[in-house]
């Protein structure tokens, strides 16, 4: 082992960190934390700090840190069979069992699951399968994908294009031309303040219809959406949104991808966001909560309707030319099996619903009515506090104010990790689903303290 006291400087000298201000980090002007341990809802760093992780890493450590059951399953799998591929009909006990467990939990009309590594590559798989599907059906022109502004679907070439946040396009020549964006279902930030929620939903529908009309339905293959907008601001949809959008898509024979990377496996207090909001997707993207991030693994779940056509394609054109070396990696799959068993045995889906509500109620009691708190929202174990320069005048802060970054830094000093969401002044919370009442109380009191200190 090389000398430990060098870690921070090695980090600055060698490590290209994702989603980081590279120059500031190299200069030592940006936050740096070397994380050394985790247990339950808490992580520890090299400075000896113990922090309550109210964002579960990147909303992924759903069962909490340090769960022995998962660590042991990973270890056993590595000893028994560290790797075998899934090409040409190969499987492992872990990957076959996990596929069965995923389908048992998914809506009835879903048929098969393909395993990848992360949410970004799962969405690449999805778009490829949609193109393949339409090619098999002889609809060579039906290829464009509609996404929403403020959606987050990853940061690859296609998945980064689907993402509707400007930061992820800037200087990358994205979005690709096959991707179109429509209105974000973000009632709190609607342009017309006089609109009722129902009128705003109608506007989302009209905007989608207008886009389809402009481009031609025969050029549009699919729409993708997160049941609850996540990285774009933790925004649950306005009432009736999904039913209205689904009706438009059905009318124009446009497929629907429910990106359940955040909402899958219990975060909303239901197994999937699709169950929660009555969405009937053709594809579901899953990742994070599939293994609680104990190992990288994602999935694309396909409906019966799509699967029949994919099978037909291989009868006509031969084996499907798609796959990664690490598809259905046995260690990821073993982590997934142990994780989903733990979600069940710990009752985490129910706990997410109950503790999430308790968290939002606590935030509302502590901060509702504050001159700078415009909105407190969320669903299940997801919560957001949206800050404004002046609530009465409905005036937002300037981007340069970096208010949420200051608050998040003050909270971290005090031992709680929240997230400054990348667009707007939004404090985000997505704690482990195993959160306790005492931990909720700690999050609420330290959030309120930091908000009142900074503002
Ligand atoms: N889709 C959603 C809804 C996400 O929130 C994320 C990541 O946060 C992704 C896709 C991309 O997943 P990954 O970062 O594993 O590639």
Image: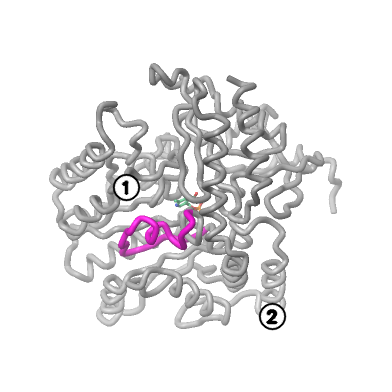
Camera-near label (1 vs 2) is 1
Q: Which residues are magenta?
A: 268-287
Residue at which label 1 appears: 147
Q: Crowdedness of circle 2 by 10 Å Cα count: few (<14), some, many (20+)?
A: few
The response on whether ligand 1 sits within 8 Å of label 2 is no
Q: Is residue 250 left or right of residue 120?
A: left
Q: Is residue 132 left or right of residue 86?
A: left
| 388 lies above or below 150 | above
- Mark 2 falls on what kind of element? helix
Q: Crowdedness of circle 1 by 10 Å Cα count: few (<14), some, many (20+)?
A: many
Q: Nearer the viewer, residue 451 or 409?
A: 451
Q: Indicate whether residue 271 is drawn in magenta.
A: yes
Residue contact between numbered discs 1 and 2, judged by CB atoms under 8 Å: no
Q: Nearer the viewer, residue 445 or 343?
A: 445
Taking the spot 65% from the left edge, 79% from the top edge, the residue there is 81
- Mark 1 falls on what kind of element? strand
Residue at which label 2 appears: 80
Query: How far from the left and from the top, in percent, is residue 249?
Result: 21, 55
Q: Which mark is residue 348?
A: none
Q: Is residue 212 left or right of residue 108?
A: left
Query: How far from the left and from the top, in percent, is residue 229?
Result: 41, 45
């Amino acid at each position: 082992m090389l000398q430990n006291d060098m870690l921070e400087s090695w980090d600055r000298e060698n490590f290209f960190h994702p989603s980081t201000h590279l120059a500031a980090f190299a200069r030592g002007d940006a936050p740096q934390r070397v994380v050394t341990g985790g247990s339950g809802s808490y992580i520890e760093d090299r400075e000896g700090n113990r922090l309550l992780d109210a964002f579960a890493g990147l909303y992924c450590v759903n069962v909490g840190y340090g769960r022995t059951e998962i660590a042991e399953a990973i270890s056993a799998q590595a000893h028994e069979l560290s790797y075998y591929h899934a090409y040409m009909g190969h499987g492992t006990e872990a990957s076959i069992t996990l596929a069965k467990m995923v389908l048992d939990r998914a809506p009835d009309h879903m048929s098969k699951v393909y395993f990848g590594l992360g949410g970004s590559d799962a969405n690449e798989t999805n778009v490829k399968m949609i193109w393949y599907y339409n090619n098999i059906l002889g609809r060579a022109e039906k290829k464009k994908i509609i996404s929403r502004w403020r959606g987050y679907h990853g940061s690859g070439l296609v998945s980064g294009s689907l993402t509707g946040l400007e930061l992820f396009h800037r200087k990358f020549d994205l979005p690709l031309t096959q991707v179109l964006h429509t209105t974000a279902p973000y009632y709190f930030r609607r342009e017309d303040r006089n609109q009722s929620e129902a009128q705003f939903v109608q506007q989302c529908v009209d905007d989608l219809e207008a886009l389809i009309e402009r481009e031609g339905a025969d050029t549009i293959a699919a729409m993708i959406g997160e049941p609850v907008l996540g990285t774009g601001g933790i925004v649950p949809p306005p009432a009736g949104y999904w039913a209205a959008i689904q009706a438009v898509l059905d009318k124009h024979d446009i497929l629907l991808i429910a990106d359940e990377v955040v909402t899958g496996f219990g975060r909303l207090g239901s197994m999937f966001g699709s169950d929660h909001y009555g969405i009937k997707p053709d594809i579901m993207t899953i990742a994070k909560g599939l293994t609680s991030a104990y190992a990288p693994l994602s999935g694309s779940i396909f409906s019966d309707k799509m699967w029949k056509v994919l099978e037909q394609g291989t009868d006509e054109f031969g084996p499907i030319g798609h796959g990664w070396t690490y598809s259905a990696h046995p260690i990821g799959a073993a982590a997934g099996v142990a994780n989903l068993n733990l979600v069940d045995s710990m009752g985490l889906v129910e706990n997410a619903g109950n503790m999430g509500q308790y968290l939002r109620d606590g935030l509302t009691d502590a901060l509702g009515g504050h001159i700078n708190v415009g909105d407190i929202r969320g669903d299940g174990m997801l919560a957001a506090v949206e800050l404004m320069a002046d609530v009465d005048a409905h005036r937002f802060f300037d981007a340069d104010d970096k208010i949420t970054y200051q608050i998040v830094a003050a909270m971290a000093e005090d031992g709680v990790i929240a997230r400054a969401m990348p667009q707007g002044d939004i404090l985000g919370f997505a704690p482990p689903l195993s959160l306790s009442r005492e931990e909720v109380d700690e999050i609420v009191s330290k959030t309120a303290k930091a908000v009142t200190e900074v503002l």
